[in-house]
Image (cartoon, coloured by chain):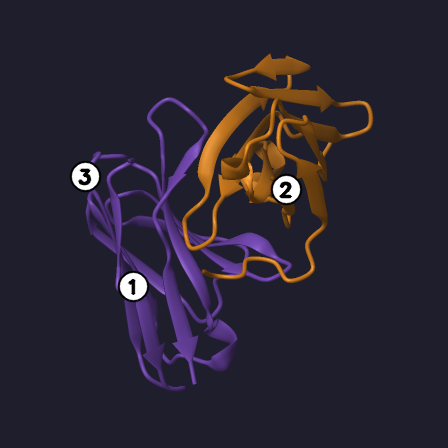
Amino acid sequence: DAGITQSPRHKVTETGTPVTLRCHQTENHRYMYWYRQDPGHGLRLIHYSYGVKDTDKGEVSDGYSVSRSKTEDFLLTLESATSSQTSVYFCAIRGAGTGELFFGEGSRLTVL
Amino acid sequence: GESVGLHLPTLSVQEGDNSIINCAYSNSASDYFIWYKQESGKGPQFIIDIRSNMDKRQGQRVTVLLNKTVKHLSLQIAATQPGDSAVYFCAESGREYGNKLVFGAGTILRVKS
């Protein structure tokens, strides 16, 4: 257990509504990541953070924003959800001194 | 549970046999590789990693082999058990990727009892 909690675990929303997913960690790790997982695409990086208020884009960042005001929380926001953002979203933290990532249990988002 | 890959390659093995899952990675400059296991409805779990200065690394019941010449990574699971049924992902990292992990699409392992 890497001490990562994602919320909500499941959400159904309508096109055009804002959505925020939360990732909370208890391990005080510096690096945090948001990935999305879709059939046939594996895991694709949306955004990541390397410290409080320090964030950067990943390969599929369009339509998403993130914020990290505290070490333990990394928020992913869809300002105006679209059906193409229906996916399973995973938060991850990077182990101290290693390159491996530890993942949360995922948040399934359905945009109707 | 969630379907993480409708058209992923599938490997079916008999319980007790050894499994070999293969991965072709993209970048010859990648210097760090990881295998993850993902069970239905769960997040990926770290299995084993290897750096490019090695060609083999062993864990508990698992072995990772790295062939840099052909950019090939494999995961061997000894005495495969029903609990090994999952989707397995390889991931690579290196300066070309800003030292972030880039994941493959995955392979489904089904263990027949």
Tags 3 and 1 both on a single chain = yes
- Hey, what amino acid is under mark 2? Lys
Tell me if mark 1 has few (under 14), some (14-19) or many (20+) residues whose alpha carbon lies within 10 angstroms of its own.
many
The extreme front residue here reads B113
Instruction: Say whether residue B75 is visible.
Output: yes
Foreground: disc 1 or disc 2: 2
Which residue sits at x=42%, y=55%? Answer: B41
Q: Say which colour chain B has.
A: orange
Please determine if labels 3 and 2 lie on a single subunit.
Answer: no
Chain identity of mark 2: B
Residue B16 coordinates in the image, percent (x, y): 63, 27
Distance between the alpha carbons at the discs numbered 1 and 2: 38 Å
CA gap between label 3 and label 1 equals 17 Å
Q: Which mark is residue B97?
A: none
Going by the image, does A81 lie left or right of B84?
Answer: left
- Do dots 1 and 2 share one subunit? no
Give SS at disc 3: loop
Residue B80 occupies quadrant? top right
Q: What is the x, y in percent for residue A28?
A: 21, 35
Give x and y (percent) for residue A107: 35, 61
Q: Which residue is mark 1?
A: A21
Mark 1, chain letter? A
Residue placed most toward the observer, B7 or A60: B7
Instruction: Give the mark nearer the N terminus: 3 vs 1.
Output: 1
Looking at the rendered image, the quarter that the N terminus of chain A falls into is: top left
Residue at 61%, 24% in the rendered image: B79
Res. B98 visible in picture: no
Query: Which residue type does callout 1 highlight?
Result: Leu
